[in-house]
Image (cartoon, helix red, strand yellow):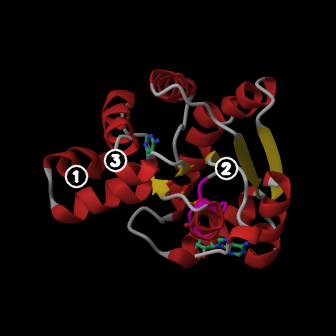
Amino acid sequence: MADADNRLAVSRVVLLGPPGAGKGTQAAFLAEAMGVPAISTGDMLRQAVERGSNLGQRVQEIMNSGALVDDETMADVVTERLQQEDAQKGFLLDGYPRNLGQARTLGGILERLQESLDAVALITVDEDELVKRALARGRDDDKEEVIRERLRVYREKTEPLVGHYEAAGLLRRVDGDQSIEAVTAELRSVLS
Ligand code: B4P
């Protein structure tokens, strides 16, 4: 656990960026520095697939195609998770929201809890580098045509969130095309 002097003052943060930008990689460091749980919707869905739960059976094919799981399902997953005890003091959301509908849902959840976001950190990386990284990672959904589809979906559905959060004064940009340690340092700096 990070000591109190090093702890970041922000407590409700969203990590935004294209697939393979390193959101999951950075979420672990950042959540520790914030003293809050890292909540990855991608990890939650993958665990559901592994367990073979109803949710897992419903989303497996969608994830393997590179498409997004429907907003209603994701709203249930996130609402339930944000109500858990450990998320009351804050959270680092990795992979949610992924489109404007999900951003509105998150806004509604936070409004009901009388809370608000402190910042949205955008990790940017060139497309060729993203494909290279994902191919090296080798997850079930890391085949070149699926990666390209995830990137297309990102540009179409998720990129509009950049303008949305910029207009709200919450966006902090970070260059993800550096070493993992350098990206962590830049994230810490823009969130300080
Ligand atoms: P996610 O799990 O969110 O996956 P991701 O965007 O591919 O990965 P991430 O950016 O976290 O990259 P990582 O750190 O692993 O989504 C998977 C699927 O779940 C989606 O396609 C969708 O179907 C579904 N889903 C999830 N959330 C959803 C939602 N809200 N709505 C609908 N559907 C949803 O890094 C990638 C690789 O790069 C790693 O191997 C890492 O080691 C390497 N790397 C990281 N940083 C690096 C660096 N600085 N330099 C070199 N390599 C680096």
Mark 2 or 3: in front is 3
Q: Position of residue 132 (x, y in %)?
A: 66, 71
Q: Nearer the viewer, residue 185 or 97?
A: 185
24 in the magenta segment = yes
Q: Which residue is mark 2?
A: 17
Q: Which residue sits at x=21%, y=46%?
A: 55
Locate residue 123 relative to residue 51 in the image: left or right. right
Q: Quadrant of residue 118?
A: top right
Label 3, residues with CA under 10 Å away: few <14, some 14-19, many ≥20: few
- Relative image position of residue 111 (x, y in whole percent): 52, 22
Q: Which residues are magenta?
A: 19-25
Q: Amino acid at mark 2?
A: Gly
Q: Position of residue 162 (x, y in %)?
A: 73, 34
Q: Of the residues shown, which amino acid type is indicated by label 1? A: Gly
Q: Is residue 44 visible?
A: yes
Task: Quarter of the image for the N terminus: give it.
Answer: bottom right
Please say if the residues under marks 2 and 1 sit with CB atoms less than 8 Å apart.
Answer: no
